[in-house]
Amino acid sequence: MNKIENAEQPTIVKYVEGNYGGIQLMSLSRYALGYVVRGTKQIYYGDTHYTVSRGDVFYMGVGNHYVENLPEDGRPFEQIVVFYSPELLQRILLQLNMSYDMNITNTHHCERCRRLNHVAVPASPTLRSFFCHTAIYLQDDNFIHDETAENIKMTELIYLIVSHEDDCLKSKVLSNVDSSHDNFEQVIHSNIFHDVSIEDLAAMCNRSLTSFKKEFKRHYFVPPHRWFIRQRLMQARLLLISTSKSISEIGIECTFPNTSHFIKLFKKEYGTTPAIYRMRHCSGSPEEAMSAAVGHGMAAETGGAGRMRSAYEGREETAERAVESVAM
């Protein structure tokens, strides 16, 4: 269920997904700009999701993204994605400034693009034309082993974005120039499922513990410990309804010290135990179960909690005892 973007793969890639794959964890080590050619992309943040429609341009930052790619009328989902690093972006912006005397500025600020790790906007006619032309190049394999062609297309794409009026997409791209910001986020996201202390993370980022905590909260808006637990629990939810792994195996995979601790944190966050969560959400279709894993609308978190809890109470206690006996 996990897709890890490899920094060694080509800069410009076309993806065609003929089969529905459910909600997947996409781990990015570089920034991504993409265009939905066909179908719909859903990007999840806990129980909220955002839709990227056909003909939209999207940006995705470094880190983990829970995404769902939906086919259209029986035809495969299709997208073109361009990956880039801060160093590549810096070189392109410098070239645009020196060769074409471009004065690149950005005054756009909004709460939505500040808090979210993605942006999606309808493609302008010039951006739509760019991606259509790029699709032809990809179809003819013109980018294979041709770094010059890739660089030219990448420069064209950045030019089309930064020469546009200020908006969320332009703001996100220009925010990637700071390589220290990029390195900080890479360290954080590469250690989500590693058993490292906050002190160790601070050392990896070359910061004191105090300055690390301050910068972390500026990036992610919550303290480090709480953020890491939430990320691990989100992955646990996905594994619960998309695999047959045991509760204890999932707890270990998501870096919880023991099964009892995992069950306790899961119940505190979602209002039910992992076993009951799996029982509730795996009774429907695979598509419904996948959607429930990340964009759940659990009654235990709404006004219907009391009504549902009585129906599941007996099975929950039984499941808890069974899980804990297996873990011991």
Image (spheres, rainbow, N blue to C red):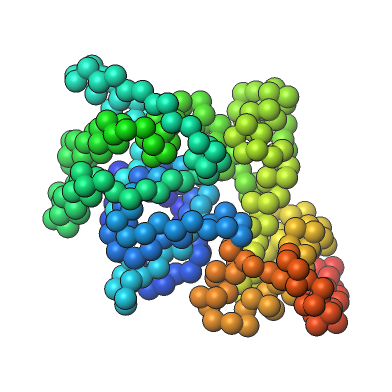
Q: For residue 200, what is the image quadrant? A: top right
Q: Residue at x 41, y 33 (%)?
A: 171
Image-based side of 113 in relation to 162, left or right: right
Camera-nearest residue between 82 and 75? 75
Q: Position of residue 25 (x, y in %)?
A: 51, 57
Compared across the picture, whether 248 is left or right of 53 comes to right
- Toward the viewer: 322 or 327? 322
Tally of marks: 0
- The x, y position of residue 133, in whole percent, is 16, 50
* Residue displayed at 64% across by 51% down: 231
Q: Residue at x 72, y 31 (%)?
A: 199
**Residue 91 image offset from top left, x and y in percent:** 30, 25
| Above-or-below relation of 83 to 321 | above
In percent of width and height, residue 225 lies at 73, 42
Q: Is residue 256 left or right of residue 21?
A: right
The residue that appears at 54% across and 38% down in the rendered structure is 111
Judge whether residue 94 can be spotted in this image: yes
Which of these two is toward me, 207 or 325?
Answer: 207
What quarter of the picture does the C terminus occupy? bottom right
Q: Horizontally, is 288 left or right of 307 in the view? A: left
Residue 25 in sight in this render: no
- In this rendering, the answer to whether 245 lies above or below 252 is below
Name the quadrant containing residue 55: bottom left
